[in-house]
Amino acid sequence: MNRNSRYAANYLFTAVVWSAVIICCALLCFLLSTIIWNGVYALSFKFLLSPASGFGANGGIIYQITGSILLIAVTAIISLPIALGVAIYKSEFLKSCRLQRLSNLLIYGLNGVPSVIFGIFGLIFFVNLLGAGISWFAGAIILAIMILPTIVLSTYQAINSIPTIYRESAQALGLDTWQIITRVLLPQGLDGAITGLLIGLARAIGETAPIMFVATAFSGVDIPDSLNGPITTLPTHILALAKQATDAQALQNAWGAGLVLLCLVMLLGFAALMGRIRLKTRWQ
Amino acid sequence: MTGKPALKLVAPVVSGATALIEAEKFNVWFHDTQVLKDIAVSFDKGLINCIVGPSGGGKSTFIRSINRINDGIDGFVVQGELSFKGRNIYAAGTDVTQIRKAIGIVFQKPCVFPKSISENVLFGLQPLRITKLEKLCVVEKQLKAVSLWKEVSHRLNDPATSLSIGQQQRLCIARTLAINPEVILLDEPTSALDPVSTRAIEELMLKLKDRYTLVFVTHNIQQAKRIADKLIFICEGQIIEQGDKDKLFNQPEHERTRIYLHDEYCEC
């Protein structure tokens, strides 16, 4: 390949890469601007702080916001300790290469399961088998199972990235395995766990399929007063409003709810980014 | 913390031992590769025991075996006797954490935890079992012992990573001293340091040798000449010669010892 050909190939490759970047950015900007442009007109204190009425076409989204936040808060409480335990076991106690490969297969496999399958599983297991009925708590468990691989992998990577010398230095000072886990590994792995948790929650808060058969109702629901009973969330509310797209008010409310959901997801994504930066700088 | 090693053990107690640490026919394998062969040596209190030899000769493996840091390495197998105060370090039922507290180790590269200077000194202690005043006393005492107090006393809460590499290594030694060991193993602790920091560590070793049994690994012959009392020359996993430093430098029994100590080159 002569000099001119190398230059041509270089320019071509640069152009392809830049085009990919521009297309991605343009799509993202188009998506965000459309949601913001259409959703901003619906936003008001009244819309954010009042309950829905008329099957969601009128009123606000206060119960949908609190429902979504409650659901992901309980999801976080269920999933974080389990994920920490799995990640620590995988990193510190699972020594067999064959079992490591098997655990990776299971975790990545679980991560790849379509979300609607979790919904069907919840319907069969909680509603049909256990007879729990529609329960928002069962929905939180389903979401926790769904985001478990994300948190496990993030925590495992954070723990595994701790240089061996730190473990050996702690061992050399007479710390036992439990003390090494609590005083060296967990403080460093927690950032990764929280990053994974927030990414997982950002996914969970936008999901409709895993919870719509198990935990949610489309209208006439407020804040649940027990572990049983339905809940209403932003994604299911948007779905309900989208079905009434011929009603201009319902459509505007759907855009407004979409914008609020987007803000919540971006907030979680931003927190995850900050956690990752902190993790990176800590070990430098 | 990787895999429980398969340990082959011989008699747990070395009878009539007078040295603090004593090895007799001590062998180490990593999987099928034998890295230490019939090591027989003793380390007495009040001496700087210096292990020298070419890289890859088994010096680090040996001292890491003494406080059982190698236990976590997959395929690590020992055979023979390695005793501390007459008791076999590898005997079944030995409390490994107690062994590690009694036999501290300082590694080649200083490794401070991402915590403050004072927290690093206290890292090996049980933080809930001592008062704030006691903690401060320990920090001051150990930092003074490693001649670091004057340099850091005004910034004990600063991150330990803000110290220079030489200061970090002295902090690691202070952290080891805080757990009150009887033996301190030093695995080439000055190899990553500049001459000034190296000198500071050497002076520290000379200061500490009355209170601790020191086992110092180095491949710097001049350093061994400066600080060693007893010299052990290890090559290809075997002790070629050991004894008084002056004897080994001036009247070595083995040709390989003479070549290594005088030409700093060994064709083992």
Image: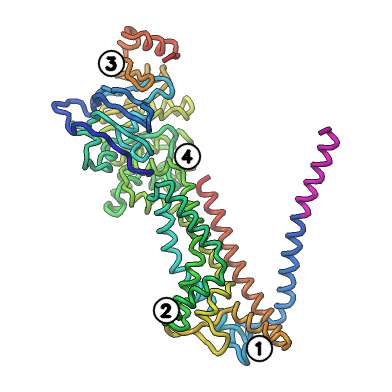
Q: Which residue is labeled 3 in the image?
A: B243
Q: Position of residue B157 (x, y in %)?
A: 43, 48
Badge 3: chain ID: B
Dividing the picture into quadrants, the one containing residue B75 is top left
Q: CA distance from mark 4 to mark 1?
A: 63 Å
Q: Count neighbours of disc 2 (C-alpha within 10 A) and say few if under 14, some if 14 to 19, many if 20 or more.
A: few
Q: Amino acid at mark 4?
A: Leu
Same chain shared by disc 2 and disc 3: no
Q: Are marks 3 and 4 in contact (CB under 8 Å)?
A: no
Q: Position of residue A137 (x, y in %)?
A: 45, 77
User: Of tags 2 and 3, which is closer to the observer?
Assistant: 2
> In this image, B81 relative to A28: left or right?
left
Q: Is residue B101 above or below residue B45?
A: below
Q: Residue at x 46, y 26 (%)?
A: B196
> In this image, B190 relative to B5: left or right?
right
| Disc assigned to residue B163 | 4
Q: CA distance from mark 2 to mark 3?
A: 78 Å
Q: Which residues are magenta?
A: A1-19
